Amino acid sequence: MTAPRNVVITGASAGIGRAVARAFGARGDNIALLARGQGGLEGAVKDVEAAGGQALAIATDVANYDAVDAAATQFEEAFGPIDVWVNDAFTSVFSPFHQITAEEYRRVTEVSYLGYVYGTMVALQRMRPRNHGTIVQVGSALGSRAIPLQSAYCGAKHAINGFTESVRTELMHEHSDIHITVAQMPAVNTPQFSWVLSRLPKHPQPVPPIYQPDVVARAVLFAAEHPRRKQYWVGASTAATILGQKLAPALLDRYLARTGYASQQTKESVSPNRPNNLWEPRDSRAGDDYGAHGTFDKRSHARSPQLWVSQHARSASIAAAVAAAAILTRLGRN
């Protein structure tokens, strides 16, 4: 029987964060659930407790450093020192860059990038005196290879990689026993596509292949338990995207310029004024619970053979090279 850990998860009310909370709950951990939406937080508490863990829901906007710091203090007063901190909270705008306002761009950056900075800062302030702890950043393949219509989100994910590398080298310089790692995610079936601010004419969708949030949650759990690796790549598409960017970025530019608009939209028209969660949560009231899964269950993969490869470092480079070669061959035929 493993001892329960004290875990903080941002963005825990829905999507990947919700699935991650459930995965840690199944281990019997004590979990701080940080998010804005009351309905989603209440649902996340039920999920964690049903899985076997204990949960403390704390309504928090991660763009506010003081709120994140206060949430960490509240959790430690209830359960003790934090062992694991998972940064996942984000928001986005699906739109051509020239149609995004300065205020919208700033909001995405404050949540999706500075939210990670603040979470990491608050975690390290508590972990460094004890020389113990693990931070897992929920990243994205789009942090290595940007795509059209998501400039604010891609910019934030690129920034997360850069700042995390800097912090990691500082911890290494100190010979610290604190670890920080990134789980790079593929396209995931989450509710964000139903509530993201979008100026696209059709309903936004993740770029296939799509994976279920439960798959990527297992990767975050593994990363927290094996944090010495710099990164974990989840999904063959993530490996192919990151390696493809290293090998043939100009080819990917041309390919995405041709296909990147259509691949991020379904055939369903949506109102340009549909409600979104950029400024206020969509699950703000009790009972407004979107859960972990989005609307693409029938098209989503429940397994990722590449995840096993990512967890076995000696085989990872071979599998990733094969995946990259496959996608480059495909691109060359288009």
Image: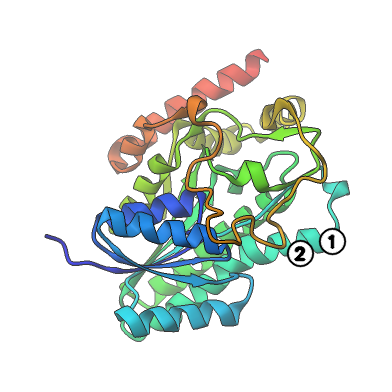
Q: Which mark is residue 102?
A: 1
Which residue occupies the foreground of this view, 222 or 193?
A: 193
Which residue, as the protein is rendered here, is positioned at the far front?
A: 287
Q: Is residue 227 visible?
A: no
**Which residue is painted at 43% across and 84% down in the image?**
73
Residue 317's place in the image compared with 196, above or below, is above
Rendered-image quadrant of the C terminus: top right
The three-letter amino acid code for the residue at tag 2 is Arg
**Which residue is painted at 30% across and 78% down in the image?**
79
CA–CA distance in space, label 1 to label 2: 6 Å
Q: How many marks?
A: 2
Q: Residues within 10 Å of mark 2 (few under 14, many from 20)?
A: few
Residue 157's place in the image compared with 316, above or below, is below
Labels 1 & 2 near each other (Cβ < 8 A): yes
Q: Secondary structure at mark 1?
A: helix
Which residue occupies the foreground of this view, 303 or 268?
A: 268
Q: Is residue 174 visible?
A: yes
Give the percent coordinates (x, y) of residue 205: 64, 34
Q: Quadrant of residue 148?
A: top right
Q: Which mark is residue 161?
A: none
Looking at the picture, the colour scheme in use is: rainbow
